[in-house]
Image (cartoon, rainbow, N blue to C red):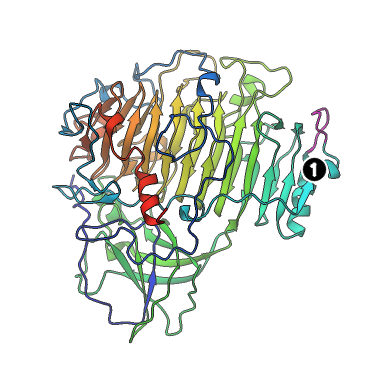
Amino acid sequence: MTRARPWRPHARAALRAVTFALLAVGACACAGATDSSAGAVADVVADPDSGHDAIDPVGRSDGASGDAGGVDTLPVDTLPVDTLPVDTLPVDTLPVDTLPVDAATALDGGSADGAPWQSVLVKEGWHPVPGPAGERLIDYSWAGYHNGAAPLPQPTTPAVSVLAHGADASGATDSTAAIQAAIDAVAQLGGGVVALPAGTFRVDGTLLVTASGTVLRGAGPAQTRLWFTKHVGMSHKAHLTFRGQPKVDLVAPAHLPPGSTSGPSDLWPGYHVNLPPKPTLQKGDELALTVLITPGFVADHGMTGTWKAFNGKRVRFWRSRVTKLTPSWHGSTVVGRAPGFPGKVTYRDKPQLERVTGYLSECGVEELSVGNAVDWDDAWAQNQVRAIGFEGVRDCWARNVHSFDPPGPKQEGHMPGAHLQSSGIVISDSTRVTVQGCHLQRAQHRGGGGNGYLFEIRQSTHVLTRDCIGQQGRHNFIQNWGFGTAGCVWTGLLSEGGKAMISKDVAFAPTAFSEFHHSLAMFNLVEDSVLNDGWASRNRGDWSSGAGHTATQNTLWNVRGTGVVISRNFGHGYVVGTGPKLQVSTAVNKTDGAGTAPEDWVEGQGQAATLTPQSLWASQRKHRLNL
């Protein structure tokens, strides 16, 4: 198949138009650029660390996270943790011919004498520079709550106690109505804290947050426990949902930069959008750059007959917001920066800018534990039962949320002491969300159909998952279902015990990886993490309703552990700095490598300990915000 041409910057003259400069958060440093955040206007400059105790599963020493968190005392997998897939069963681990692991594309990198070293693709510890064949990283520092420019908030008032509405902290009776009443009372106050004191609160129904500014706060994950019992009719639903109502109220077609010719383009580094004579855009408006999934787009990626679920639909490839308005002398044009588009985007695909309203914002859940495990057969009777869901939100968070083994007799099956029916925290159609210091584990349903995903991101931009632990799920950390997951960062992770169960009656299960799972996740970073099962980016073909190429332009940086990294991105992908026991496979002559040439960039194998910086995200953020 035809490979996408390398992403490359376009040097352009000044706009001859009234220009509204839209800083598309997440813009990268392009070749010849002197500042990866050129034109950036940061309204708030602050450290995102909240001061809360946080799990630091990887023992970082770069100051990017909180306390170590005592990983050695955490529960460990009761099942053998294999390091390689062992058969060709029809599971998400993909065919065994991805192994044996190779290192054919390893480049000179690292230091034989253990001295600190920097990637060829980065200078001064933060600034991306192009590689010899068009390889390019981006500025990943924009991920998270308010693009990392503000700390996670700690509101204290107004506070509404669930006890005041009749909640039972003993777990003996159902507290669904009482907790929902407290949530609704906070909404009437215009925002505040739903206070959940120490205790176990049984929730036989579901909870819903639809008002911005609502924070559910416990007394700590060892003290406050939400025990969700419902399972019938819970497929594809969450027990606790934060739900916005995103809608589009302004649409304008996007065009190539002035001076460009029509035809294939990656729209790098900007997009230009014609607006009405009196545009109504204002600073702070939420925008989405969207593309129509046309037959030509699918064909250009070699996915005809594979990609089907989103064909003919318009998808949001990148979310940003207006942070600066700059008038010029003529016309009416909005200009934005984005890291680029995968493959070949042309006018054929009708790229356009949309203003999006209706996001839920400034909401969070923190300092508590959740558990929803039920009888084994009941858990397997449903699919994708989630503990917590964020849908259509911006600038929200989950902080120090753990899972626990809920009380009551359970048919334990093959997961004694289970915590969750299937899935943990799911984020969809959202932007600028932080998941920090969370520890989820021990899913019952780890079979096919989208189950056992402990930390899941769907069609979202700039999600930051940091200092989190995922154990004994199927895919502990995962991007899933559909185009549009971009600019996300996973840092300071511990992933282990991922298993792909064949059925509820078979105890044996091959290893399953954390991974990019579906439809071209792009410009994401996985870094400074321990992967004792693995991470995969590849062509999954017809699996999962035609996942096809799951990744393009994604980076694994300073990854360690005893697992396996499979890196087969469409176009380019990057593996920079790995631990001595982590195995790396980039060969394209595998079943899951079809159409992924050239092989992904590999640099500094076995040299993760001396890679500088250890956290690219933290280094770039420090530079951008002058911390």
For label 1, the residue is: 162
Q: Position of residue 355 (x, y in %)?
A: 48, 67
Q: Is residue 583 visible?
A: yes
Is residue 568 among the parts visible in the rendering?
Answer: no
Q: Is residue 507 above or below residue 19?
A: above
Q: How many marks?
A: 1
Image spot of residue 440 (x, y percent): 56, 30
The chief SS type of the magenta part is: loop
- Give the amino acid at mark 1: Val
The reply, left or right, for residue 532 in relation to residue 370 is left
At a point 42% along the width and 66% down the height, the residue shown is 41
Q: In which quadrant of the rendered view does residue 82 lie?
A: top left
Q: Quadrant of the N terminus?
A: top left
Question: SS class of the residue under badge 1?
Answer: helix
Which residues lie in the magenta part?
168-175
Q: Is residue 218 left or right of residue 52?
A: right
Picture coordinates of residue 356 (x, y %)? 51, 64
Image quadrant assignment for residue 353: bottom left
Q: Is residue 478 magenta?
A: no
Q: Residue at x 17, y 47 (%)?
A: 131
What residue is at 37 percent from the left and 60 percent from the top? 291
Q: Nearer the viewer, residue 273 or 233?
A: 273
Label 1 CA crowd tier, 10 Å (few <14, some 14–19, many 20+): many
